[in-house]
Image: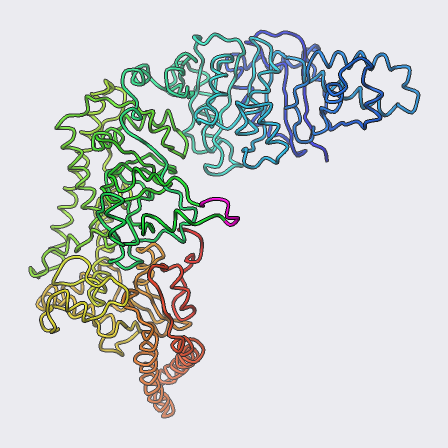
Amino acid sequence: MPSTFCTRFTRRRVAPSEIPSLILAHNLHGTEIDPRAGALAAFALSMKARAKDRRFFNRPEVQPKICVIEPISFTPDEIDLLVTKDGDRNAEESLWNQFRDADTFGSLIQPDPDATVQAALVLKGLNDLEATLHYDTLNRARLAVAQAEILSTTYSVAVANPPYMGSKNMDARLAEFAQSEFKEAKSDLFAMFIQRCLTLTVPHGATAMITMQSWMFLSSYEELREKVVRLSPPVSMAHLGERAFDSIGGAVVSTTAFVLEPGRSAVRGADFIRVVEGENEAAKRTALLKGAQSADCVWRYAASSEDFAKVPGAPIAYWLSDGMRATFSAFPALSSRSRSAKGLVTANNDAFVRYWWEVASSRIGFGYSDRDSARSSRKRWFPYAKGGEYRRWAGNIDSVVDWESDGLRIQTTLTADGSRVRATNFNLDRIFRPGIAWTVVTSGPQTFRKVPSGSLFDAAAGLCQSQSDDVHLGVLNSSVASEILATVSPTLNLHPGYLGSVPVSSAADNDAFQENVHAAVATSQADWDDYETSWGFTRLSWFGDFAGRGSLWQRYFLWSKNQKSTADEQQTRETRNNRLVAEAYGLQDEVPIDVPLHRVSLTRNVEFRYGPGKSEAEYETLERADLAAELITYAVGCMFGRYSLDEPGLILADQGATLQDYLTKFSTSSSSDVTLMPDADNVIPFVDDGWFEDDVVEGFREFLKVAFGADHFEENLRFVEESLGVKALRDYFITKSGKSKFYDDHVKRYKKRPIYWMFSSSKGSFNALIYLHRYTPSTVSTVLNEYLREYENKLQKAFERAEAAAAGGTSAKDQKEADRLRKVLAELRDYEHDVLYPLATQQVEIDLDDGVKVNYPKFYPAVKKIVGLESSDG
């Protein structure tokens, strides 16, 4: 079915205040246009005259006339008939064939009015040929002229709901057409229709449309926007934002309905109704009606195109106050004092990026301040800022990038065709310097973090560097900057160019301001380092000096109270930061100053971590559960030698680390000189009963006794079990159904790149945990011979006892147990014969530099499946 473009029109001149006399509707694929969209656009045009709709369209002189724009083309022989003898054949051939691709270009085609008149005269002179064999040619020629007349005429009003298509999705013909005919609007089809509708509208007529909102703000539409506000300023706008239509869920499409007036004075005000906050179609409709009916409505604004021009890039930021607009001329832009840039694009994060805990610690270069020292260190991996979740001041760095030999691999790896290096944006003059990072793509408010020297920056994290990073960090994390960024970059993407336009007041650069920022950064960094997934982690803050021993409950109570005070103090700092910046800009009465506690982005802040509005008891339950899980994972780390009760920080974290390496750390050769000796063979069994003396439950019990004293053991064990919500500690590690809450938590904590690997039979009746960094090719044999076969032997004896008891007929329970053990033994034998034994014979080698994503699947199906590990989520 050919694409159709339905045009209803009248040539009667109407006053701008009247209802539209032209509705131009575009349909690329023969489907129905959404009538609600047209209704919203028409409503935006006629806020003050809605009652006139029906009366106006019932007038005889404005009854619609329909024209369908169809593809039309002519052969060379037909062109011979249509061209004039003395004319320009090429020009006339182009005229007659201008609708050849009408199924692609539709009403974007812009016929020349004079050429159209000339073509009509040519046809008039050929009327006497109509009865000849040229009937079909002349009929199609008349249709071409009629279409050209429709599209070369100007009208009083045009209303449109244009199609959307980004330039990346356009085929070659459409992309070339956009480049040649719509240079200012080529980024998207809807923008091209904005430009086209304006050419269809007479001076002081009206173009009413509903489109994506992106043209209002993005730099890719800056030329179009500048042209619109200069030559065809808005008359009115209903800014709808996300979820304007229930049929389009989520944040997929953000829209705006507006009216533009060609020739309107740039100083004249326009009405804007902001309903971006509505959660659904009904809510937006209600808010829109209220805004239209009341000039005093708080979400109704007045602004002129002259106002827009005061902001760099001229975004349609109608909601800005005069004071906020004045900051752009009163203060220099951030770009004049700093350099903002897009970070490194490796073009293959799977190959070049790891979480820091995946690789050997000795292979990571921390704290190198320049390229030369990093190169000479012969380290392979270096800290890599990659964006991350909502977090202010510090943190969100847990990745490393392959920059060995000054990034040799990244800088020399070519594309598949060998034409160029795949990676881009090396920023070689900036790497390893301190700076400010933010998350380039985020659906929430922007947050900025200090990145100390020694890091590289990923494209997902923007990069801002200057001699005044702390000052700029405080400004950027203020409510003033939030309001400004909502103006210059109100979309999901905050690119460096937008950040560079933020005005920066030197009045904020004073000792009190900087001290406040330094304290906020230090607090945020300490909070980040309180988790194992930070390379700055040494020991849990609530763990303290284990030599103090004592009650975990008392420790928790005092620690939790202290964390609440820390969050309150950070809240005070952020409020102070907002006030100091607002005063420096003279905007203290225009931006929010107070910071709600749930927006203070410390993970130990329960209102931020678990969300606002919960009771103290609910927060305590959630906090205790997480702390108990953290204590257990730290204890398991001590069992494997990753951590130690005798010294803070990492102990064993290199490939193939051994117990001798552990003892060497403490300058001793005797296990009696350490408080808690790690597991000897790097295998900790997880089974549903106490079949092994060195199983994980017994290991944790020993940890509690050594770390906090035998006198408090029973009390502390109850605290852990109650906090986890389990009847017995073993239920957290493994259940009779083979599930392990511990391992699920571990995989989640380490973002599907676990450092402890769980060998597990098909139904989880046998499980054994190993530590990745202590793995050797013989480790699987140890799991097989020392644990699986040992477990099978023990279960076999138990099965024989249960079967003998069942044969005596004393209890049905004995028969049930015998049946259960028979199934478990069959599962374990299959696991041994089909999975673990063949794997053990392979003596699998791994290289930590390859990362968990490559190494872990080498052991499938011997280890627990991790959903999503194989997906490209690096």
The residue located at (16%, 31%) in the rendering is 514
Position of 360 with respect to 92 (left or right) is left
User: Nearest the camera: 826 or 293?
Assistant: 826
Position of 148 with respect to 311 (left or right) is right
Q: Main secondary structure of the magenta part?
A: loop
Residue 772, x across and y down, in percent: 30, 65
When asked about the image quadrant of residue 825, the answer is bottom left
The residue located at (68%, 24%) in the rendering is 6
Check the image and report above or below for 866 versus 245.
Answer: below
Check the image and report above or below for 595 versus 641.
Answer: above
Residue 82, x across and y down, in percent: 82, 19
State the quadrant of the N terminus: top right
User: Nearest the camera: 139 or 251?
Assistant: 139
Count how many numbered circles sit on residues in the image. Answer: 0
| Segment tinted magenta in the rendering | 416-421
User: Nearest the camera: 257 or 346?
Assistant: 346
Q: Is residue 419 inside the magenta stretch? A: yes
When asked about the image quadrant of residue 145, the answer is top right
Residue 405, x across and y down, in percent: 31, 51
Position of 74 with respect to 492 (left or right) is right
Check the image and report above or below for 318 versus 426.
Answer: above
Residue 95, x across and y down, in percent: 73, 20
